Amino acid sequence: MEPDSLEISIGPLRAKNPIFSASGTFGYGEEMESFVDPGIYGGVIGKSISLHPRAGNPLPRVAETAAGMLNSIGLQNPGIDAFLREVLPRMRRYRTILVVNLVGDSIEEYEALAERLEGEAGADAIELNISCPNCAAGGMRFGIDPRATEVLVRRVREKYRRPIIAKLTPNVTDIAAIARAAEDGGADGISLINTILAMAVDARTRRPKLANVMGGLSGPAIKPIALRMVYQAARAVRIPVIGLGGIMTGEDAVEFLIAGARAVQVGTASFIDPAAGVRIAAEIGAFCDQHGVARVADLVGTLRVS
């Protein structure tokens, strides 16, 4: 398959391939540079950035499960000032799409973050984290109610002219309603799913394995749920959908594309293999060659349901 056959458009963004790093699993790129060139990815999405620095949740905050992992990191990050001063200038070297994931405890914090990024070169888009289950305030509380989602996205839209992606939570009963709300608010795309609220118990100590008791479940265990929600969301909106949740192989990624996603994010797989995204992109190309698919975009939304 020719390299340009992997290109995909996500609204006004043109990606060299459909693989993006998932926020929180790839650092800000620097952590992975000894394993892989982040610029090979279609896009890099760094860890969440908040208005002020966050220390994150107490340890332990990661636990392995039978088919994935639990995390309760708590959005540890250096804050927007340090990000703009120290991190973003280095990320610009990657020569790929850069998406800045934002999290706040209030609409006003999201607005302030968007304003800070509006004039910044290299920040091609923002992803609004309205789906993190690991924080007491903010984040997911905006993403579980359609009206709150629409208002938040609309307010940020007034401050930021470049593409806005709303990252949605699976911890809702009607994902289509939330997806439509994000679109109505002015989002250029949606990404889903974030982790599923879950917990693990150590039977010997009778204590939770995470200090925060509960955390977000990711990995292969959540893939069927993610596929279902991507399919439902893609049918509900006209804007592009980016799928994530348990993608470990190229065929996993192809399934998300067929269900309606225009691109995918690779997360938990990167903890096992830091270059997983590069391998998965190559496997997508091989799949297309084997099945006579000329361009990866030709797979999008081709699920046969009858």
Image (cartoon, rainbow, N blue to C red):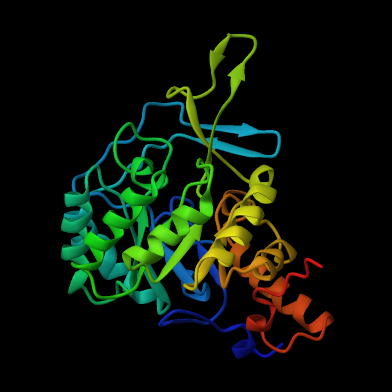
Q: At 58% across and 9% down in the image, what residue appears?
A: 206
The quadrant of the picture occupied by the N terminus is bottom right
In this rendering, the answer to whether 78 lies above or below 95 is: above
Which x, y percent locates residue 254? 70, 68
Q: At 19% across and 68% down in the image, what residue appears?
A: 158
In this rendering, the answer to whether 199 lies above or below 175 is: above
Q: At 52% across and 75% down in the image, what residue appears?
A: 40
Which x, y percent locates residue 184? 36, 65
In this rendering, the answer to whether 221 lies above or below 123 is: above
Query: Is 213 on the left-hand or right-hand side of 111?
Result: right
Location of residue 151 by image quarter:
bottom left
The quadrant of the picture occupied by the C terminus is bottom right
Tell me, yes or no, if residue 117 can be seen here: yes
In this rendering, the answer to whether 75 lies above or below 64 is: below
| Front one among 232 and 270 | 232
Query: Is 54 on the left-hand or right-hand side of 101?
Result: left
Location of residue 53 by image quarter:
top left
